[in-house]
Image (cartoon, grey):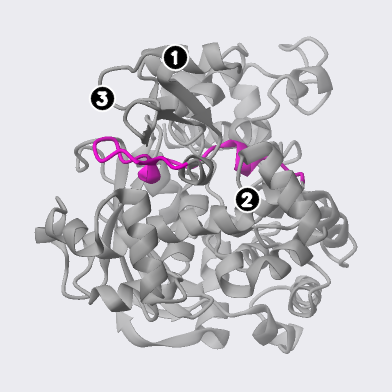
Amino acid sequence: MDDEQLYRAVRGKDARFDGVFYLAVTSTGIYCRPSCPATVPKRANVRFYRSAAAAQGAGFRACKRCRPDASPGSPEWNARADAVGRAMRLIADGEVDRGGVPALAAAVGYSERQLNRMLTDELGAGPLALARARRAQTARVLIETTAMPVSDVAFAAGFASIRQFNATVREVFDRTPGQMRERSPHRAEAPADGARLRLPLRAPIAHAHMRAFLGARAVPGVEEVRGGRYRRVLDLPHGTGIAEVDLAPGTASGPPHLPCRLHLADLRDLGTAVERLRRLLDLDTDPGAVAEVLGADPVLAPAVRALPGLRAPGAADPDEYAVRAVVGQQVSVAAARTAAGRIAERYGKPLAAPSGELVRAFPRPEALAAADPADLPMPRSRGRALVGLCEALASGAIDLGPGADREEAAERLLAVRGIGPWTADYIRMRALGDPDVFLAGDLGVRKALQRLGGTSGGVPGGIPGGIPGGGAVRAWSPYRSYATHYLWAWDSRESEE
């Protein structure tokens, strides 16, 4: 999009572009999200930026009305598999705060100088500036939604000193930390412990389907869906945490979001916890763009109309979902859930402070790599595959983190004995968050296509087995993971009826 197209999106208050780009107004010195409710500024006074960090670096402060720092993330960073996309996912996960720019560059496979140049060319800001913007957002959440001392907020948000923290908050938000807390609309909601926050998204979202999907697969002791709430244990860099997300429609007022509450052993993990929940719940996608592509196909159109805003859930912990993919090979969803629960009960780490039915973290690959395949609740051949996978994950031979190279990871997964194409693709779709994976060999996908008329006799170029030909499936790109989820949802719906 050129600047004139971007300005038209601003004039239309188009919320789909919130988080995709930012506009800065030279006459006021502030930057906003495209859907800001304020009067649209004159075109001559508007500048456009690809990141909040770039706007901040140009001397603009965040709008207090539309709060651009709280926009949903750009769906581009979930889709892109190049170095910039991988770097952006790692920065959002807190890699710069934990290991600095050298660790980020090493994870992506470029020199610090090359990485800084690529990010600056595309986003107008280098890795340090992008990480600083993330820290500022984390600080705002902690200031406004917790009762912890402001001095503790500084270090929990990742700042090296109180002075640096105060200067950044004042520069970005044009208020001191104390003023932000005093004027916070959420001040009365701040719990005595934990943090209550909002996870912004682009509407619509299929709440009921998300609850059903996560609930059917919830590992006992690790996660649960009760009423309209999804709760799970998070295994984070500095400790464990418990997240609770409200998935009931109609409970959220204001801009589209999901209410969330976090209880963390170490508040330094807040930004990472939020990012991992966003990936798990697929909150950065653009459902309108997905519907436009998939809804144009006569086979998928009924499913797309029936479930507006369907998401393709990812992973809070990629290694965990890789293990669960192997556990789920050739068994039902219910059987996989039971087996995963038994594995978690035997090998998972108990929580120091359990919360209801949440009593343990899912076992790390290191623990399962040392297991005897004969002791695992599955056929021995599958147990050997699981142990082999965990050995590769524990040694670093396979990387499934946010900065992983998806093609390389898929190749290494297929090299593990006992892991076939379905499992590798499922891991790529969920653990790696790839939005463009179609599970053509999945039984539920085939059944749904037959019911929708997508058989070899109903779709030009179809092939035996009820799967459309390559041309039809390619037309669903770059949203073939969503096509898979729509077909699963349609199969479940038809089975229930």
Q: What residue sits 25% from the left and 41% below the top?
A: 64
Q: Nearer the viewer, residue 105 or 198?
A: 105
Q: What residue sits 39% from the left and 20% below the top?
A: 14
Q: What residue sits 67% from the left and 32% below the top?
A: 480
- Which quarter shows the C terminus? top left
Prevailing SS of the magenta stretch: loop
Q: How far apart are marks 2 and 1 (CA)?
A: 31 Å
Q: Give the residue number, with chain letter if any, for mark 3.
A: 37
Query: Identity of the amino acid at label 2?
Result: Met
Q: What residue sits 52% from the left and 61% below the top?
A: 316
Q: Is mark 2 on a helix, strand or loop?
A: helix
Quarter residue 403 falls in: bottom right
Magenta range: 59-82
Query: Identity of the amino acid at label 3?
Result: Pro
Q: Pick whichever of labels 2 and 3 is earlier in the sequence.
A: 3
- Residue 52 placement (x, y as % from top left): 48, 42
Q: What element carries label 3?
A: loop
Q: Which mark is residue 44?
A: 1
Q: Distance between the residues labelled 3 and 1?
A: 19 Å
Q: Pick whichever of labels 3 and 1 is earlier in the sequence.
A: 3
Q: Is residue 73 magenta?
A: yes
Q: Give the residue number, with chain letter if any, for mark 2.
A: 88
Q: Which of 433 and 439 is in front in this view?
A: 433
Query: Identity of the amino acid at label 1?
Result: Ala
